[in-house]
Amino acid sequence: MSRTALRGRAQLKGRASVFAALGDETRLSLIGRLSNGPPQSISRLAEGSMLTRQAITKHLRVLEGAGVVRSIRIGRESVFAFRPEPLRELRSYLERVSEQWDDTLARLKSFVEN
Amino acid sequence: MSRTALRGRAQLKGRASVFAALGDETRLSLIGRLSNGPPQSISRLAEGSMLTRQAITKHLRVLEGAGVVRSIRIGRESVFAFRPEPLRELRSYLERVSEQWDDTLARLKSFVEN
DNA sequence: TTTAAGCGCAACAAAATGGTTGCGCATTCA
DNA sequence: TGAATGCGCAACCATTTTGTTGCGCTTAAA
């Protein structure tokens, strides 16, 4: 396989993992909180969440694995902060797909008309 | 629960389902093809895909469930076409999150500085 | 120096996901 | 009409995901 094809596959994989990370209500609302407020500890994020602390921890690790958040240990607390880069990449990807679709639509239209 | 809260939950759910639909390499490449080329049948989409036709069918149904594609039956073929709306919604959502984060960052900064 | 808070690890269970195979029905083509 | 194409349905299997509980370790607080 060519070098660019390999890179393409890797990008595809990473992108899919970010999409997958956002494909869950619990994680989406965690993102909502972390992109809004300051970095927060696991216990803090688990408060008022129905789920146990452990469940929240797992979700946070998924988000971290996709690069959407990062964590640092401060004393006995694990503090999570939002990371905007992956979401920016997704946005630009979605933009490219939309543009592609517009072009395709135009082509199809002219094909039908002629 | 308030009316706007209910609507908010429903939106969250729908959005999560779209993200989840895109959170898979196979489905991402299907989207790539459908947003690029013309509507295509299942067999066509399954060609050169490693996976069986049935597997591709399942993926297409997931995409359809999230509203990212739609299908119509033409004779003995099931033809799938791209639908841009849900991805547009995601893009605007990601945009809002980014803006929110910019604001939050500014607030945090001024908090630290004072 | 006890006590309590915050986590991580491990084991476990249930449900969802991703994939296969076999089969039968409808539609098209020769 | 008979053969072949395109699908859908159902059963089934392996793996991953989502969540829980129990326990022990470290760090902070009284």
Image: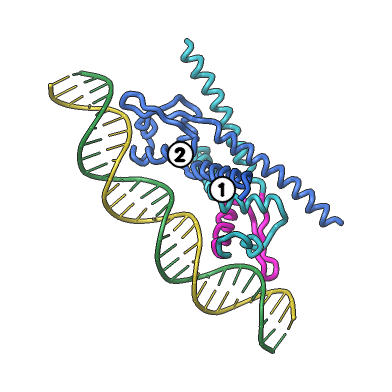
Chain colours: A cyan, B blue, C green, D yellow
Residue D14 spot, x, y in % from top left: 34, 56
Residue B53 spot, x, y in % from top left: 34, 37
Q: According to the image, label 1 marks what residue?
A: A22
Q: According to the image, label 2 marks what residue?
A: B65
- Give the camera-side residue of A12 and C5: C5
Q: Is residue A70 left or right of residue B50?
A: right
Q: Residue furthest front?
A: B2
Which residue is located at x 57 percent, y 58 percent? A61
Question: Is residue A48 shown above or below B69?
Answer: below
User: Mark 2 falls on what kind of element?
Assistant: helix
**Nearer to us: label 2 or label 1:** 2
Which residue is located at x 47 percent, y 10 percent? A114
Amino acid on which disc 1 is placed: Leu
Magenta residues (range): A54-83
Q: Is residue B87 magenta?
A: no
Question: Is residue C13 shown above or below B98?
Answer: below
Residue A41, visible in the rendered structure: yes
Give the Cα separation between the discs numbered 2 and 1. 17 Å
Q: What subunit carries mark 2? A: B
User: Mark 1 falls on what kind of element?
Assistant: helix
Query: Total label count?
Result: 2
Residue A19 spot, x, y in % from top left: 54, 45
Q: Residue furthest top?
A: A114
